[in-house]
């Protein structure tokens, strides 16, 4: 079988995933999902630092991310089908032809066997074992996450969160001189918050929202991340998706080389 036929539809899927990443970058640039503001209330002489969420933007990134991940999961299945299906005639077995994933290293052999890999060759079977597509320690976590997050997205959106760990007390004092040096910011995902008294009504008040209440947007570096508790995963949305593309290409190259050693 020509190699380009084996990989053609898979690389179309990968190309589409890349387009989704560019769409996410555009949303992040043009319609940021999170902003950080300080609201000053001259009535009660207090300031409050808080995160503002752009729900429409957050949900858009979640939808696009899910589509990108699904395309990469499908890319793996497309190549696997092209390689394995010619060796499987039983209709029931053919329904199970898809790239194998496992929860643990101990169950990987069983998972690969259940997807008819051994019918191609011992080399192809061993290639899948060597790819280590499981989340357990020692596995290929980026590869395994493609499947795990695709499953997650089938049940609920992969809602991104804002990581504001770069905000410090000294950073705040550069913007508001009355920010107390003893005040600790509660920095975390969408939870950077502080409340303090105003010593002056002339220090960086910002825009007048309504009489006596002002709001100033602070230019804070924010990393938009996936934080999937059930998968113990926490990292940049764009970086994650780019890593997923790299590991998908690597897995495809490995499978094709193992299945067609004379063409590699």
Image (cartoon, rainbow, N blue to C red):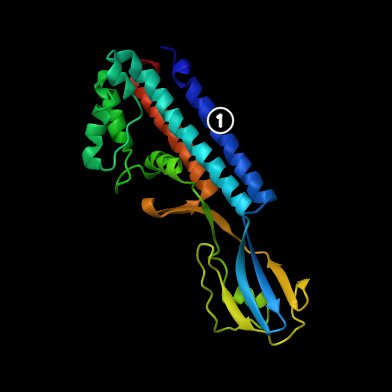
Q: Residue at x 22, y 32 (%)?
A: 110
Q: Residue at x 33, y 45 (%)?
A: 135
Residue 115: image location, x then y, percent: 29, 26
Vertical placement of 183 versus 137: above or below? below
Which residue is nearer to you in this view: 156 or 262?
Answer: 156
Per the image, label 1 sits on a secondary structure element best described as helix
Residue 196: image location, x then y, percent: 61, 82
Vertical placement of 102 versus 13: above or below? below
Please name the residue that numbered disc 1 is placed on: 15
Query: Image check: 264 left or right of 170?
Result: left
Instruction: Determine the image quadrant of residue 38.
Output: bottom right
Query: Image check: 66 left or right of 85?
Result: right
Q: Residues within 10 Å of mark 1 (few under 14, many from 20)?
A: some
- Quadrant into which the C terminus falls: top left
Instruction: Determine the image quadrant of residue 34.
Output: bottom right
Vertical placement of 168 versus 240: above or below? below
Residue 174: image location, x then y, percent: 67, 76
Q: Residue at x 51, y 26 (%)?
A: 11
Q: Can the viewer see residue 129 in this picture?
A: yes
């Amino acid at each position: 079988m020509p190699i380009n036929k084996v990989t053609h539809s898979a690389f179309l899927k990968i190309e589409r995933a890349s387009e989704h990443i560019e769409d996410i970058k555009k949303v992040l640039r043009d319609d940021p999902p999170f902003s950080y503001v300080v609201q000053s209330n001259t009535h009660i002489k207090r300031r409050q630092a808080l995160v503002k969420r752009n729900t429409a933007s957050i949900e858009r990134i979640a939808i696009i991310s899910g589509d990108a991940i699904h395309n990469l999961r499908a890319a793996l299945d497309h190549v696997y089908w092209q390689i394995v299906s010619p060796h499987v005639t039983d209709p029931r077995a053919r329904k199970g032809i898809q790239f194998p994933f496992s929860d643990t290293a101990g169950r990987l052999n069983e998972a690969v066997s259940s997807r008819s890999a051994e019918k191609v060759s011992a080399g192809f079977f061993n290639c899948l074992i060597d790819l280590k597509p499981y989340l357990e320690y020692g596995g290929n976590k980026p590869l395994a996450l493609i499947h795990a997050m695709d499953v997650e997205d089938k049940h609920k959106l992969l809602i991104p969160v804002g990581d504001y760990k770069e905000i410090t007390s000294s950073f705040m004092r550069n913007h508001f001189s009355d920010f107390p040096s003893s005040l600790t910011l509660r920095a975390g995902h969408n939870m950077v918050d502080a409340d303090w008294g105003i010593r002056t009504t002339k220090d960086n008040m910002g825009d007048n929202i309504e009489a006596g209440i002002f709001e100033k947007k602070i230019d804070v570096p924010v990393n938009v991340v996936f934080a999937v508790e059930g998968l113990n995963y926490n990292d940049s949305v764009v970086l994650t998706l780019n890593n997923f593309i790299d590991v998908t290409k690597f897995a495809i190259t490995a499978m094709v080389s193992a299945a067609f050693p004379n063409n590699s």
